[in-house]
Every structure is written in structure tokens, then in C-alpha cells.
Amino acid sequence: MSDTVNTTLRKNALGVGAIVFLVLAAVAPLTGMVVVASLAIALGNGGGTPFAFFAVAVVLLLFAIGYGKMSSELVNAGGFYAFVVKGLGRPAGLAAGFIAMLGYNFFVVGTIGTSGFFMKIVIADKTGLDMPWLFWGLASIAVCYLMALRGVDFSSKILGVSLVLETSILIIFDVAVLFKDGYSFSAFSYHSITSGSLSIGLLLAATGFLGFEATSLFSEEAKNPLKTVPRATYVAITLIGVILGVTTWAVVSATGVAQAQDTAIAHAPTGDLVFSLASTYIGGFLTDVMNWLLLVSLFAAMLAFHNSSSRYLFSLGRARILPQVLSKTGPSGAPYVASTVQAAFAVAVAVIFAITGADPILTVVPSMLGFGTLAILVLQALAALSIVVHFRRNDDPRIWSTLVAPALGFLGLCFAVVLAFKHFDIVAGSDSQAVNSLPYLLVVALVGGIGYALYLRTSRTAVYDALSSDLERFDDHLHNAPAVGR
């Protein structure tokens, strides 16, 4: 690759707040409440669901302690792929890279389905303009793509506005419930916590945090990343836990803790549990605002996951695992080739779904988001194990932060992965045999990653060796060496 070709991401573009905005936008708190929390109450442990969100937050914070220590040694746009290469070795790292690439790209396809479906419903209801879901989904990804090309700092500003707006409407709802009825502490009684299915409640609560792991993906673009990335991770997990946990507590208090599950089940076909409560507690006007902000939230999630997906493609291209052209960046520092490929893939899959007549909310969304959820949970568990192995290999004396805490986080994440495999039909929201066969793609990624690593070791040794040397080059925050094409 010519020296004149730029393959460097924009440096010093993001502070702690900007990275938190990028991450929380992927989590999409309003969408998390409307979709994830409502399902967790209906299918999980009902009135005890707030406990599930807080419990998952504690597990992820334990993981984040080790994650922060690892992030303070490794600055790389490869995210968890880079973590696994450093901790478990290159073959496992390639497998993790392929799993990440599949999971995040499928997630973007799913966001086209959710954006398209809800935009069709809300816009038709409010304006009378009735267009097919695919039209709105493709319009969303087109705008998302153009924004991503403007650079990650521009994306963070857009996502920051979105996050403030959707979080504000949730806070207004929380405060209204608190002053009108108060919060019921019976939600944390043993009976409530163990009612229904606690395991499914924990699993669905864990899906509400998906996206926090993207903090490391933006490390090469962060200001002082050795400190910024760990801080952003702690802040992101804490805020997600507080927003989703407290708002779920408000919801079950408003419905009545004992009646929460039955009420959520009754509203499951229409998905309007949160909106029905909002109309009672904050009025019709603000409920209409909440409807529009749901569309903003869905778009923000699409933009955040698109940015994450393109950085995995960029990193794998720079390492020459995928075509090296994916590592090209534009004047804004955005990986424009990777971004283009990612958007094209998502559009192609969404169009295929539409041509076959697939229902967006019954087929596209559950299959794509369900598989993406499973893939990211596996990726998080591999990263947690990598942290423990890396620091034990180097005889790190910090027992709590590099062994005990991340090991507990690893066990918690393994539990979530087992639950996700066991209840994949619930995660994917479908009993279709084709949809429930998607987890086998992870086996393909695992075998393919390890097999490709063995091929590189024997036939393309320079590329294989660079898988480690590229990471080491970033260990001291780029060591004055820009991340250029190899």
C-alpha cells in the first residue's frame, strides 16, 4: 500500500463524554425500555425485573475492572478482537474477530428492521404518510452512512443530543411515577426476584447492556485513551444500570409489582406497555414526544452500531486478515471503505428479507438482533477470559483487579452465554427452525478463525506475525508511530 494512502483514524477526537455518548446511543435507553425491559418483565421474573438489571450491572462492573486494566495497556481499534489476540493468542483472536464481525454486522441489519417498522407505524399514524418499512429502513441507513463519513466526533455530537433527549423523557416518567405513586420496595423481595423465570430475566436484562463494550473500539480516536477508555467504560455501565434499573422499577411500581408480569404479557402483542403507562403518568403530549424520540433512539443505535462494525472491518483490514483496502480512511479520519462495505452488506440483507416478504418485526429484527446478541455475549466472555489469562501469564501482583474481579465477570458472562444458547428462541423472539439454527454460525466463525490462523502461520507468516506485533505497537499509546498500512 502506498505511503500516500491514509489508514490512520483521527487522533484525540473523543473525550470520556463523547465515548459514553457513542456507547449509550448503541444501548439506546428508550428502545431498551420499550422493547427489552417490557419483554424481561413479561417473560422473565415479572415484578422482580429491576433486580435483574442491577445484578447484571454489578457483574459487568466486575468485568470492567479487569477491562480497564487491559485497556490501560492496549490501544487498538480492534476492540475485543485485540484483547483476545493479546490474551489467548492469534488463533483465538481471529475467531473472536470473525464472531465480532458477524455479530455487529447482523445487528445493523436488525436496526434497519426496527427503524423501518417503527418509522412506518409512527409516521403513518401522525402524518398519514404510509410507506413500506424498507423505504424508511434504507433512508435511515443512508443518513447514518453519511453521518459516519463526517467522522466519529461528529457522530458523537449527534448521538449526544439523542441520548440527552431520550434519557430526559425517561427521567420525566420516573419522577412522575415517584411523586404520584412512589416506588414499591417489594420489587426486591425474595418472592418477587424469584417469581417467573429469573434466568430469562437476567438474560434479557443482559441484552439491555449490549454496546458498552464498544468503548475500546474508539481507543485510537480517544484523548489520552489509557485513562479515557476505562473511565468511559465505568461511566457507561453505571449509567445504563441506573437508567434501565430505575425506570424498570418505576414501570413495575406503576403496574403493581404483583401484577407486573400479567400486565406486560397483556401488552406484549402491541409492545405498548411503556407508552400506555406514559399516557397515564405524563400525559398525551409527552407520550407523543416519546413516540418520536423512540425513532431518534432507534436511529442513534443504528449509527452507533454502524460505527462499531466499521471499526472491526477497518482493524481486520489493517491487519490484512480481510482485504487491506478496508483500512483506508478519509480526511475526517473515518474508515470510509469499511463504512461503505458495512452499509452495503446491511442494505443487501435487508432488501433480500423484503423481497422474500419477511415481516420486519417478526422475522428480520428477532433473527438479526438475536444472533447479534449471542455473538456479542460470546465476545464479551472471551475478552473476560483473555484479561485473566494475560495478567496471570505476566504474574501481575494485583489480585483483585486482574484476577478476582474479571474472573467473576467471566463466570457471570458465561452464565449469560449458556442462557442465551438455551433460550435462543426467546432472545430471537422466534420458534423458526431457520432462525434457531443461526447459533451454528458461531461454530463456523470459531472453526474458520482457527483454521485461517493456521493457514496464515504456514503460508503468510508476515501477516500472522503482525497480528501480535501490531498490538504491541499500540501498547504505549502508539509510541509516536501512526497506525499506517503495513
Image (cartoon, rainbow, N blue to C red):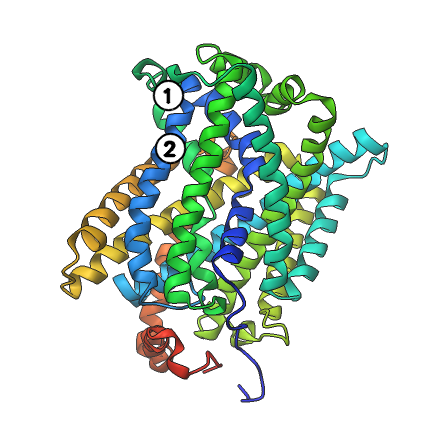
Numbered mark located on residue 54 in the image: 2
Position in image of residue 450 (x %, y %):
33, 62
Residue shown at 49% from the left, 81% from the top: 485
Between circles 1 and 2, the one closer to the viewer is 2
Crowding at dot 1, Cα within 10 Å, few <14 / some 14-19 / many 20+, comes out as some
Q: Is residue 419 above or below residue 15?
A: above
Say left or right for 273 vs 104.
right
Which sits in the foreground, 472 or 355? Answer: 472
The relative height of residue 241 versus residue 4 in the rendered view (above or below) is: above
Q: Nearer the viewer, residue 244 or 414?
A: 244
Q: Name the residue at 46% across, 78% down.
A: 483
Which of the two residues, 254 or 342, is positioned nearer the viewer here?
254
Tell me which amino acid carries mark 1.
Ser
Q: Which residue is mark 1?
A: 197
**Label 2 Cα neighbours within 10 Å, binned few <14 / some 14-19 / many ≥20:** many
**Residue at point 39%, 68% (across, down):** 75
Q: Is residue 254 above or below residue 93?
A: above
